[in-house]
Amino acid sequence: MAYELYYWSGIQGRGEFVRLALEESAADYLDKGRQPDCDGALLDFLARRDLAQPPFAAPFLKDGDVVIGQTSAILLYLGDRHQLAPKDEAMRIWTHQIQLTIADLVAEAHDVHHPLGANLYYEEQKPEALRRAKYFREERIPQFLAWFETILARNPSGEAHLVGAAVTYADLSLFQVVEGLAYAFPRRMKRALADAPSVAALHQAVARRPRIRAYLESSRRLAFNEQGIFRHYPELDG
Ligand SMILES: N[C@@H](CCC(=O)N[C@@H](CS)C(=O)NCC(=O)O)C(=O)O
């Protein structure tokens, strides 16, 4: 039975981390976020009263009777089933730990343009966003990239992957977060990636993987835009 991926229409968002894992695995999946009235269907699903384990928010993945919310938990599940994570327990949890750290970075990237809350428009929180952007650009982007650079350097199997000698969902997610940050903060990321050459190399290597490249070139891959998590507001870059 095909997986069903529930996510909002019109944006890559957090759903994209799941899509990349599904695409790399050549898994059979139905992208509900690309179907007519998908946002209504998503809200209807969240409102279901018959689920003992309802997800809190999108994305969530349905695999028959199993429903999994939280991007990192979905990837933990897919990683085991599609050889996108090591089998060894310690390394499996290490991969999950990296994914959770990427999820923190994604949340911080979102909070740059919505520092007061998602209930207000960006235009209603611009002064706070400008302050948050400076901190994010100058301190947080370098801190996160330096950590990825360190773990690539310390991987006993070499710097080509975050974990072990084969691709994992963490590599795919690092690709996606670098893509998003480079869209949102092109000036800053040009300099930041020059200081993180192993991260930059892994980003390029993932983009060249045949199934990922085919997906990126397909109409299934939406462009970044100013409704998603990674938004390009030139005044927040620098
Ligand atoms: N930690 C969750 C965050 C989920 C999340 O914030 N989803 C957003 C869309 S990207 C949403 O639908 N939020 C609605 C809400 O939080 O009520 C994850 O990584 O999946």
Image (cartoon, rainbow, N blue to C red):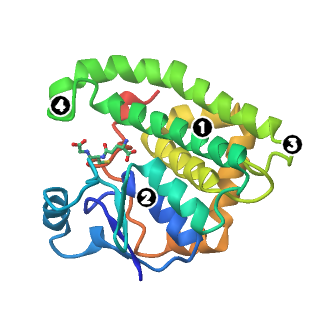
Q: Could you say where residue 7 lies in the image, as x and y percent from the top left?
A: 30, 60
Between the residue at mark 4 and the residue at mark 1, the CA separation in whole angstroms equals: 26 Å
Label 4 lies in ligand 1 vicinity (Cβ under 8 Å): no
Q: Is residue 231 left or right of residue 22?
A: left
Name the residue that disc number 2 marks. Answer: 16
Of marks 2 and 3, which one's residue comes earlier in the chain? 2
Q: Farthest front residue?
A: 52
Q: How many marks?
A: 4
Reply above or below: 20 against 144: below
Of marks 4 and 2, which one's residue comes earlier in the chain? 2
Residue 162 visible to the viewer: no
Q: Farthest bottom residue?
A: 1
Category of crowding for the residue at label 2, using alpha-carbon neighbours closer than 10 angstroms: few (below 14), some (14–19), many (at least 20): some
Disc 4, disc 2: CB below 8 Å?
no
Name the residue that disc number 4 marks. Answer: 123
Disc 4, disc 1: CB below 8 Å?
no
Name the residue that disc number 3 marks. Answer: 156
Asked which secondary structure carries label 4, the reply is helix
Between the residue at mark 3 and the residue at mark 4, the CA separation in whole angstroms equals: 47 Å
Of marks 3 and 4, which one's residue comes earlier in the chain? 4
Q: What residue type is disc 1 on?
A: Lys
Q: To which quarter of the image does residue 130 belong?
A: top left
Between the residue at mark 1 and the residue at mark 2, the CA separation in whole angstroms equals: 23 Å
Q: To which quarter of the image does residue 123 belong?
A: top left
Q: Could you say where residue 98 lies in the image, as x and y percent from the top left?
A: 60, 40
In the rendered view of the protein, which quadrant contains the N terminus? bottom left
Nearest the viewer among 183 and 1 is 1
Between the residue at mark 3 and the residue at mark 1, the CA separation in whole angstroms equals: 28 Å
Residue 190: give its label.
Answer: 1
Between the residue at mark 2 and the residue at mark 3, the CA separation in whole angstroms equals: 29 Å
Q: To which quarter of the image does residue 54 belong?
A: bottom left
